[in-house]
Amino acid sequence: MAISVSNLGFVAILVLYCFSISSTEAYDALDPNGNITIKWDVMQWTPDGYVAVVTMYNFQQYRHIQAPGWTLGWTWAKKEVIWSMVGGQATEQGDCSRFKGNIPHCCKKDPTVVDLMPGTPYNQQIANCCKGGVLNSWVQDPANAASSFQISVGQAGTTNKTVRVPKNFTLRAPGPGYTCGPARIVKASKFSTADKRRVTQALMTWNVTCTYSQFLSQKTPTCCVSLSSFYNETIVPCPTCTCGCQNNITQPGSCVDGDSPYLASAITAPAKNNYAPLVQCTSHMCPIRVHWHVKLNYKEYWRVKVTITNFNYRMNYTQWNLVVQHPNLDNLTKIFSFNYKSLNPYGAINDTAMLWGVKYYNDFLSQAGPLGNVQSELLFRKDPSTFTFDKGWAFPRRIYFNGDNCVMPPPDSYPWLPNSSPRQTISILGLTTAFLLSLAFLLVHA
Ligand SMILES: *[C@@H]1O[C@H](CO)[C@@H](O)[C@H](O)[C@H]1NC(C)=O
Ligand SMILES: *[C@@H]1O[C@H](CO)[C@@H](O)[C@H](O)[C@H]1NC(C)=O
Ligand SMILES: *[C@@H]1O[C@H](CO)[C@@H](O)[C@H](O)[C@H]1NC(C)=O
Ligand SMILES: *[C@@H]1O[C@H](CO)[C@@H](O)[C@H](O)[C@H]1NC(C)=O
Ligand SMILES: *[C@@H]1O[C@H](CO)[C@@H](O)[C@H](O)[C@H]1NC(C)=O
Ligand SMILES: *[C@@H]1O[C@H](CO)[C@@H](O)[C@H](O)[C@H]1NC(C)=O
Ligand SMILES: *[C@@H]1O[C@H](CO)[C@@H](O)[C@H](O)[C@H]1NC(C)=O
Ligand SMILES: *[C@@H]1O[C@H](CO)[C@@H](O)[C@H](O)[C@H]1NC(C)=O
Ligand SMILES: *[C@@H]1O[C@H](CO)[C@@H](O)[C@H](O)[C@H]1NC(C)=O
């Protein structure tokens, strides 16, 4: 009986483990409606086109775009040009040689637009602009989850019958990962004045929806999980080569040691790809490691310490977040020094939570080095019907860092409760039985 129950528990963890791996490639089960919606509101027709306000809304619960920010591209349907922009700019002007007098801001068939930086003069700003392309997540910072610019388009349609919506939208963050659908003409947006006594509306509106896939973003994982507990001194490290292997022969300089004299020059050396991490040499080679330590066991509560370590010398993570799935998160009693929100993707099951840093205290995860970590402790209330330290129950089922799945160690390596392996259970059971039998034998024959 004892054997089959523990095997069942093991199979259940194994199934969860496989599920967490395959989820890397599918849509995000913990944020099934997550998307970035780009809305174009035509505010005015002009003699040769229109003026539109373009707004990007980050409707993702826990995935954000940090510095150096988003870039948005599209392909014009006809021969449109951009006369001018406010609160954003095209990265390249392109060939405007056919124009005399007024020269457009951008003549490219496929313009690429970026946000302006904070501190832009007021006459070049509009509401929600000029944040250096940073787009925070909907849960963490809804006030900064939208980004806007204004665009004056020429050589375009001048009525809602003749205007052609742009095609082939691309959103980069600034790396790949997002896929955008076609622009769809929707009901015109309505705007109410500050005193809410008058409502105006756009002349025409179209929406584009972009969704994220970690598989498109990077082929290898970027984050791993290590585990430890008070009841077993084993520290289960991140699986070796989770995010790459140390190989100085085929890939020299793929990592650096923290005490290497070349560290400073390696950090400042121009990388082949600006966003490629420069990681500290570890067996897992991941830029981010999340450590989950089961720290204390009280009568009615138990306590976990979570530490996030940055091994990337080229990245400071601002507004980082963690998504954790664990069956006891429905009874999280207290969290020290992180913010917390329960996520409820399926209504009934309340086992997933988002954690993020406290503003100005630990919302900034420094580049690799002595300051490159943040930590917090979680206090859970035990539910006697489910609580156990056995079979790895106290460890998380799934962890995301900034929306990307963190690779867990294989479940059969989790720290065991002393004497809880199936083999040991049998032998103790066997020994006890033998002892009792011999005791009975002695008693009977006494
Ligand atoms: C995008 O997200 C919003 C907010 O969650 C949701 O209402 C909308 O249906 C989503 N759009 C798509 C195409 O999934
Ligand atoms: C275009 O404008 C006309 C009125 O000029 C309006 O009746 C029609 O609904 C508009 N179409 C769209 C797609 O906005
Ligand atoms: C869409 O954009 C991508 C990247 O900018 C480009 O490779 C592709 O050829 C474009 N497709 C069309 C139909 O314009
Ligand atoms: C278009 O996007 C806006 C802003 O995200 C949203 O409020 C509106 O519901 C969307 N319309 C449709 C039809 O999806
Ligand atoms: C790889 O090279 C780096 C930088 O020279 C060095 O710090 C590291 O120890 C080397 N790793 C191995 C496994 O030789
Ligand atoms: C990270 O932030 C520190 C302190 O603000 C700064 O000195 C360092 O250059 C930053 N590193 C990167 C890679 O941006
Ligand atoms: C989920 O659990 C959290 C933490 O105990 C609680 O605050 C929240 O109200 C719960 N939500 C639902 C829908 O049960
Ligand atoms: C939280 O713990 C208490 C005490 O054990 C239990 O009665 C309650 O059902 C738990 N809540 C949930 C949502 O499991
Ligand atoms: C601790 O857990 C490991 C599995 O990770 C196991 O091999 C070891 O026997 C356990 N130690 C004790 C004292 O039970």
Image (cartoon, rainbow, N blue to C red):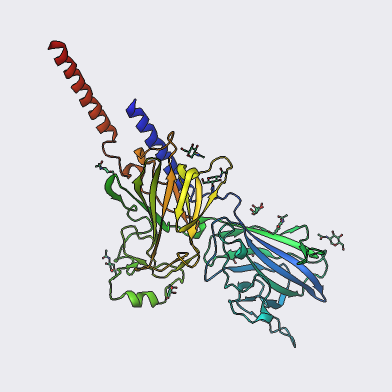
For residue 60, say whether it is visible. Answer: yes
Q: Is residue 132 above or below residue 208?
A: below
Q: Is residue 421 above or below residue 121?
A: above
For residue 105, say whether it is visible. Answer: no
Quadrant into which the N terminus falls: top left
Residue at x 28% of width, y 76% of height:
261
Residue at x 72% of width, y 65% of height:
40
Q: Nearer the viewer, residue 352 or 226?
A: 352
Q: Is residue 175 left or right of residue 315?
A: right
Q: Nearer the viewer, residue 7 or 424?
A: 424
Quadrant into which the C terminus falls: top left
Residue 229 image offset from top left, x and y in percent: 32, 47
Residue at x 76% of width, y 65% of height:
164
Q: Is residue 219 above or below residue 263?
A: above
Quadrant location, ligand no. 4 = bottom right
Q: Is residue 278 left or right of residue 151?
A: left
- Name the residue furthest left: 446
Residue 30 image offset from top left, x and y in percent: 54, 48
Residue 148 image offset from top left, x and y in percent: 66, 69
- Name the residue furthest bottom: 101
- Name the residue furthest top: 445
Residue 225 image offset from top left, x and y in percent: 38, 53
